[in-house]
Amino acid sequence: MEVYSKSAAMLAIYTIFVYPFLLWIIGSVYSYREKRSYLTNNAEPTVTVIVAVHNAESAIEAKIENLTNNNYDPAKIDYLFVDDGCTDGTVAIIQSNPLVNLISLPIRQGKERALAQGIAEAKGEILIFTDVDTLSDSCAVSKLVRHFEDPYIGAVSSYDIVDYPQYSLKYWYIIYEMYLRSLESKLGCSVGVSGSLFATRKILCEEFNAGSCSDLEITIICAREKLGVITDRAVKAVYKKSNTASGELSRTRRTMAHGIFTVINNYNILNPYYGGLYSWQIFSHKILRWLLPYLILAAIVSGAITTVAAMSYYVVPVTIVSAILAYTFVGLNVRRAINENICCFLMAIFSVSLAIVTVVRNKEIGAWSPTKR
């Protein structure tokens, strides 16, 4: 039991601490930025912004206003909304705005297939993908697009900001994820981009698999093509947390399952001969991260069993009672934080389990419902 506890703990420590430390060391020695040409910020290629929508009546007006209120040359940008079987007033609102274009799918097919249809109809050299409930500043488009002046860059991600309270594990998870991407960006090899807002070259999107996770697959395509993927901290993508636990569970399960499907469909990228540095990164950043809740749970449970076995018989109930009393007498806010974080951890385990079951059953994730925020 002690061996299992130590093994799980070591893998968890590697995933959380050692991997970013190694990234920092490598980034201190080598940085792709040293090889980049000077960016003049004058490059203005044609751009198409693609948004897949399904029953987003409450958010669509704010999204259109936010998108169209930017400082990019209006003659070089267009906005394409893909209606994935909306049954509310979303389509009518989109049609009432002359600044945006609409594609309506005949039947509901799911977000990734909606995006694929948008890609097929897009006219821009650079494609920007964004979610309907994500807002950004008026310079976001120009900040994203400027990086493509460098021919090495294949994709650019925004920096996520979500309104979780600071005591929440979710809050620190997102901070940690953004920090990891910043370290990876220094190497020009970020694993994953923010599905809420990212940009890429249209020619790369022709390789998209409609059943895969576009924000992960684009980084695999770039790694295969020896192109860089970076996160621009100056581009803030702001969105709200889910209103319900069931909505968050569904979103997390869907995201993880899509990600696992994507890795399976591109399994050869795990071979360092084909993937190079990215093979190590996707294993450490994605695969071990998906398994992290299990690793932490295994370390806690096996460690607890080992500790209890070594205790005197009367120490165990005393420890349990002391923990209960301590929990009872701490402040209400502390108890709320403890409860929420325990639920968050358990939900992470449940989400991973559901995602794995979905993959094992080979159940395709098609239709989707936007998370209520």
Image (spheres, helix red, strand yellow):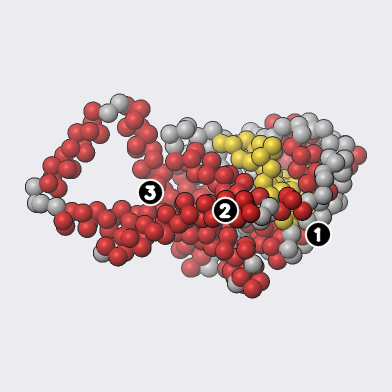
> Which of the marked residues, 1 or 2, is nearer the chain's N terminus?
2
Q: Secondary structure at mark 2?
A: helix
Q: Are marks 1 and 2 in contact (CB under 8 Å)?
A: no
Residue at mark 1: 203
The Cα–Cα distance between marks 3 and 1, rounded to whole angstroms, is 41 Å
Categorize mark 3 by other alpha carbons within 10 Å: few (<14), some (14-19), many (20+).
few
| Residue extending furthest toward the left | 314
Looking at this view, is 215 or 110 the one in front?
215
Residue at mark 3: 346
Q: Is residue 349 left or right of residue 114?
A: left
Q: Secondary structure at mark 1?
A: helix
- Label 1 or label 2, whichever lies nearer to me, is 2
Residue 157, can we see it? yes
| Residue extending furthest toward the right | 75
Identify which amino acid the numbered label 2 is placed on. Ile
Check the picture and name the quadrant holding the N terminus.
bottom left
Looking at this view, is 17 or 35 the one in front?
35
Identify which amino acid the numbered label 1 is placed on. Ile
| Rendered image: mark on residue 25 | 2
